[in-house]
């Protein structure tokens, strides 16, 4: 599954570019810089954490399959693949539905719904831990006898199949297609906060499950995206964990251990009512604009990170434990630092300078130990890029910042 996602990255970039062009010609602004980069950085974090979590999930699945399977289903049988796709998609519907109905799972899934925009980058804005909370629901497939390879393949197919439905550039598909399959129109409803759209259209590949289980809604009025209680931070880590803080606040208000425990399995609406005073007390975040040069800087860091992520995933099995941990830490450090920059959290800007230095050291250390043939070249390139980036960052934020500059709000 992971390799499928890696090889799909150029396709993601290409289609996002096409969507931007469509928006330009239609005179519609599908993207803002801050939101788009944040979506993609959260996606990078999801893929990075997935290097470990997917091994745990598939390892657990393989263990259950090995010891508890009832049938020996063949790998190279089309009926096994089709049957698994249908069964997987039905289970996914319920996993997705409970992710909206149980606080413990909504805390992980909420990150996917935080964007106030709706475009292809939102498809990549995925939770870092949701898979670990929901994988147990798919274990019956292992007991039936679905091979690990089939499970991993179908999981990748269903994940990729949901990418194209995150767009406003496509209006409606043919009526017969809209009746059976999930489409951009159906999924726009799912991401909307309009009262009549809440908790609707949970389907992944097929929308037929929503029609069967009473959660279908047709797109009629224009959707308003985001979450009902606003999330405005551009910090990818905070985006993934903030709801659990809110659950903890709610648990303090509940009396008795049983009520505190069952809060995890109550609805987000219940929690919202329980801690509404907390939400009301939160100050409205004032977005400080970021100048164009810093947007370019963040874009360059993102592109370098995306390229590095692909190489890191492809070489992951060949690296030592130390470099695996160090690489994951550096990727997470980078995406969080970019969030700080876009949030204009100036007190945390020294962390970016530290990151640039650590990145250069780590890159050269890994090449010295594993790829010595190219060490001299990487040493020269990384020092040059690192020095240029550091000087650029210092100039923009500690010298030029003293003078008035024109900035953009997007």
Image (tube, rainbow, N blue to C red):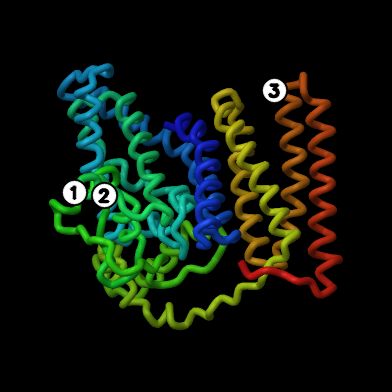
Residue position marked by numbered label 1 in the rendering:
209
Please provide percent x and percent y for residue 264: 30, 61
Residue name at image x 35 percent, y 29 percent? 153
Q: CA distance from mark 3 to mark 2?
A: 45 Å
Q: Is residue 124 left or right of residue 336?
A: left
Please provide percent x and percent y for residue 65: 25, 26
Residue name at image x 42 percent, y 64 percent? 243
Q: Are marks 3 and 1 in contact (CB under 8 Å)?
A: no
Q: CA distance from mark 2 to mark 1?
A: 6 Å
Q: Are marks 3 and 2 in contact (CB under 8 Å)?
A: no
Please provide percent x and percent y for residue 96: 29, 51
Please provide percent x and percent y for residue 179: 20, 49
Q: CA distance from mark 3 to mark 1?
A: 50 Å
- Is 340 located above or below residue 58 in the figure? below
Looking at marks 3 and 2 on the same chain, the residue that comes earlier in the sequence is marked by 2
| Count of labels in the image | 3
Viewer-side residue, 379 vs 190:
190
Snapshot quadrant of residue 294: bottom right
Q: Secondary structure at mark 3?
A: helix
Residue position marked by numbered label 3 in the rendering:
370
Quadrant assignment for the N terminus: top left
Residue position marked by numbered label 2 in the rendering:
203
Q: Is residue 321 left or right of residue 350?
A: left
Q: Are marks 2 and 1 in contact (CB under 8 Å)?
A: yes
- Is 156 located above or below residue 268 in the figure? above
Q: Secondary structure at mark 1?
A: helix
Quadrant assignment for the C terminus: bottom right
């Amino acid at each position: 599954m992971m390799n499928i996602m890696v090889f799909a990255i150029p396709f993601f970039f290409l289609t996002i570019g096409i969507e931007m062009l469509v928006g330009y010609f239609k005179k519609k602004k599908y993207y803002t810089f801050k939101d788009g980069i944040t979506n993609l950085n959260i996606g990078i974090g999801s893929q990075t954490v997935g290097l470990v979590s997917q091994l745990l999930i598939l390892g657990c699945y393989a263990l259950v399959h090995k010891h508890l399977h009832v049938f020996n289903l063949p790998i190279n049988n089309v009926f096994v693949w089709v049957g698994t796709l249908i069964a997987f998609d039905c289970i996914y519907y319920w996993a997705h539905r409970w992710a909206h109905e149980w606080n413990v799972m909504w805390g992980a899934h909420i990150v996917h719904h935080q964007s106030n925009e709706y475009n292809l980058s939102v498809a990549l804005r995925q939770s870092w831990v949701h898979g670990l909370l929901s994988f147990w629901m798919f274990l019956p497939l292992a007991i039936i006898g679905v091979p690990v390879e089939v499970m991993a393949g179908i999981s990748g197919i269903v994940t990729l199949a949901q990418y194209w439905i995150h767009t406003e550039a496509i209006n409606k598909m043919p009526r017969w297609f809209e009746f059976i399959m999930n489409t951009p129109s159906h999924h726009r409803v799912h991401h909307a906060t309009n009262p009549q759209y809440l908790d609707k259209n949970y389907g992944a590949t097929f929308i037929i499950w929503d029609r069967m289980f009473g959660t279908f809604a047709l797109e009629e009025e224009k959707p308003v995206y985001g979450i009902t209680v606003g999330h405005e931070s551009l910090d990818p880590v905070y985006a993934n964990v903030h709801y659990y803080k809110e659950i903890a606040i709610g648990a303090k208000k509940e009396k008795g251990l049983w009520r505190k425990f069952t809060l995890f399995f109550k609805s987000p609406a219940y929690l919202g009512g329980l801690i509404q005073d907390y939400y009301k007390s939160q100050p409205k975040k004032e977005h400080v604009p970021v100048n164009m040069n810093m947007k370019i800087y963040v874009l360059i860091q993102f592109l370098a990170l995306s390229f590095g992520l692909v190489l890191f995933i492809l070489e992951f099995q060949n690296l030592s434990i130390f470099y695996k941990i160090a690489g994951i830490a550096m990727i997470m450090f980078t995406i969080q630092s970019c969030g700080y920059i876009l949030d204009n959290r100036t007190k945390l800007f020294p962390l970016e300078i530290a990151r640039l230095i650590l990145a250069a050291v780590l890159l050269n250390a890994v090449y010295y130990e594993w790829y010595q043939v190219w060490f001299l070249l990487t040493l020269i390139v990384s020092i040059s890029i690192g020095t240029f980036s550091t000087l650029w960052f210092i100039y923009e934020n500690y010298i030029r910042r003293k003078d008035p500059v024109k900035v953009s709000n997007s």
